[in-house]
Amino acid sequence: MSHPVYGTLDAVPALTRPDLLAAPVATAIEELRLDVLVAAIDPGHADTEVLCATYGVPLGASANAVVVRGTRAGVDSHAVCMTLATHRVDVNGLVRRRLNARKASFAPMDYTVEATGMEYGGINPVGAPAGWPVWVDAAVAATEWLCIGSGIRGSKLFLTSATLLCLPNAERVDDLARPAS
């Protein structure tokens, strides 16, 4: 299959290559009947800027998932925030208020990996823990095709923003992120 967002990668229907998916991602794709593609990559090229430079994936179509932890009165809450690679999540402003937290920060890597069942560098909202909200920045929602993590560092998912927004607990959130300076 070919599309400009794939760059030089060979994207195929995700469920034809379950070896390229973390288990919770494969389960979610199957159970939710999502129209998602996957492409194998060199795990050493999983980081966004390197991926885009190596495979020709447009930076403006690359979206990152950030897991944020909010705390109030000793109780933690989490959310998956989707932002374009060219933007940064407003953790201490909008995200903190939406989590109704006194304090918000990026969730620790070891916690995120364990809670999601995904590898660092492959975290995404497809198959995220039930109950975690998935907040999709308006710029992501306005991008037709997206390249996101697959749950492992050895591949990337391609899906439409409409597919992303149909995930359980997903909603578009205006001003979730700002362009990186």
Image (cartoon, grey):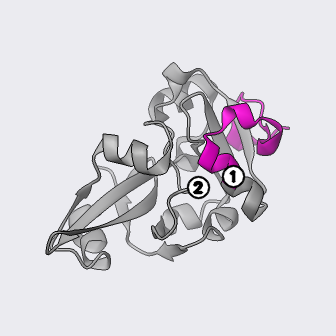
Label 2 packing within 10 angstroms: few (<14), some (14-19), many (20+): many
Residue at x 74%, y 51% (from the top left corner): 36
Give the residue type at disc 2. Answer: Gly
Report the front residue among 116 and 68: 116
Considering the numbered disc 2 on the image, is that residue within a helix, a strand or a loop?
loop
Instruction: State whether residue 137 is above or below residue 15.
Output: below
Q: Nearer the viewer, residue 178 or 159?
A: 159
| 23 within the magenta span | yes
Q: At x 60% / y 49%, what residue is drawn?
A: 24
Q: Which quarter of the figure has residue 96?
A: bottom left
**Place of residue 25 in the rendered image (x, y in percent of width and height, measured from the top left):** 63, 49
Is residue 42 visible in the rendered structure shown here?
Answer: yes
- For label 2, the residue is 127
Relative to 132, 52 lies left or right: right
Q: What type is the residue that disc 1 sits on?
A: Thr
The quadrant holding residue 14 is: top right
* x and y percentages locating residue 149 in the rendered image: 56, 42
Q: Residue 112: image x %, image y %?
A: 38, 48
Secondary structure at badge 1 equals helix
Residue position marked by numbered label 1 in the rendering: 27
The disc label shown at residue 86, or none: none
Q: Whole-percent x and y of residue 73?
A: 14, 75
Res. 77 image quadrant = bottom left
Q: Is 53 in the magenta?
A: no
Q: Are marks 2 and 1 in contact (CB under 8 Å)?
A: yes
Range shown magenta: 1-27
Q: Is residue 91 left or right of residue 31?
A: left
Mark 2 and mark 1: span between their CA atoms?
A: 7 Å
Is residue 149 shown above or below 78? above
* Residue at (27% x, 46% y) in the render: 108
Q: Is residue 34 visible?
A: no
Q: Residue at x 63, y 32 (%)?
A: 155
